[in-house]
Image (cartoon, coloured by chain):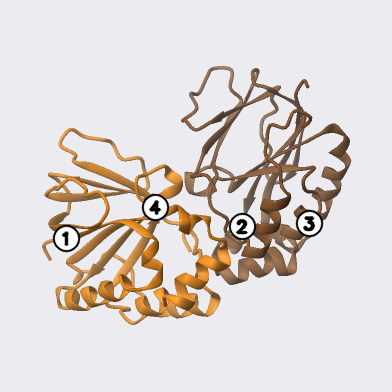
Chain colours: A orange, B brown
Amino acid sequence: MPPPLHVSFIAGRTGTWRIDSMSTVRGEPLALAERLMIVEGQEATPHSDMQWALRGVTSNTRYTHKTELEHLVDKQEGLRRLQATCAAFIPIRKTAAWWDLAQDERRAIFEEQSGHIRIGMDYLPAIARRLHHSRELGEAFDFLTWFEYAPEHAEAFDDMLRKLRNIAEWQYIDREIDIRLSRSA
Amino acid sequence: MPPPLHVSFIAGRTGTWRIDSMSTVRGEPLALAERLMIVEGQEATPHSDMQWALRGVTSNTRYTHKTELEHLVDKQEGLRRLQATCAAFIPIRKTAAWWDLAQDERRAIFEEQSGHIRIGMDYLPAIARRLHHSRELGEAFDFLTWFEYAPEHAEAFDDMLRKLRNIAEWQYIDREIDIRLSRSA
């Protein structure tokens, strides 16, 4: 597992990824923007035509057990695959009630009740994913998840999101923005 | 549980806490300094006579189960008790091998094998403690722990540290500085 990587997602008029849609699933919306730039491993410089910037950092796993981690490592593929010209960027915030739970209670909701890992596993390796933690950086969201997939897996991706939004864990989410993006092949 | 609080520990010539000793337990030392200033809830401003500054952020529990959390909340006292004129500041870093473990493996080492929570519990409420996470902030240490206690509990504190340094979890620590401090009553 690589050491924590700081990543800034900067929405404005420039960047590799074109924003095709932005939907507010829960809570306050984010300002609309045309493109998203992703800056890794350094503090992003704010610039004048920026609509917003969200910062996150990759980290160690928090709920995944050894056997699950082995399956994930075995099945998942990395970002930046040539054919993965579609992406989704989904910032979420969890409620205070979630963060007040003890570790075993959060794990039980996350996996035993919700099957979060099991659901995600069914869509590997088609959907690649990187989770960024934001809560400890003092950001407006707790997590920023970045997904990449080929256009032929767009339906599968929607299918996965539908399932995730119905699990018990999702009741602890009070802000969620669903941003879809694409880039030229 | 309060939301994440950013805390900077700034060593130099000023600050409420006088540094009485600094011992390097493992790894590279930190520069000696006279006093420690603690700045909460904001980015600390670097100043010219500063020896070093370490930043951390409080967060949700990562290993504590519900019954353990209930016992802790029941027994522990907060920082800034009038009689607690002694403090210890212990920055530690864990190895890559620790961070590569899955959640259930880290929990098993932390508590079932090491009794980290059980050991700490025996010293409540005499020893007050606040844990700050640093790894995701890109700092040189992974955790900064701040302890406060009355002078008559200094021996008990040493006793607790001796036990902690002998547990299985401590084999995953490759840098540790033990800084002892005091303030006027």
Mark 4 vs mark 2: in front: 4
B179 vs B20: above or below: below
- Reading the image, the residue beneath label 3 is B119
Label placed on residue A9: none
Task: Tell me if mark 3 has few (under 14), some (14-19) or many (20+) residues whose alpha carbon lies within 10 angstroms of its own.
Answer: some
Name the residue tied to disc 4: A142
**Labels 3, 1: one chain:** no
Identity, as a three-letter code, of the amino acid under mark 4: Asp
Residue A101: image location, x then y, percent: 53, 60
Dot 2 amino acid type: Thr
- Of the numbered discs 3 and 2, the one sitting upstream in the chain is 2
Label 2: how many Cα within 10 Å (few below 14, some 14–19, many 20+): few
Q: As displayed, is residue A32 above or below residue B112?
A: above
Q: Which residue is mark 2?
A: B95
Query: Against B72, is A128 above or below?
Result: below
Q: Which residue is mark 1?
A: A181
Q: Would you identify the image quadrant in which residue B52 lies?
A: top right
State the separation of the CA atoms marked 1 and 2.
37 Å
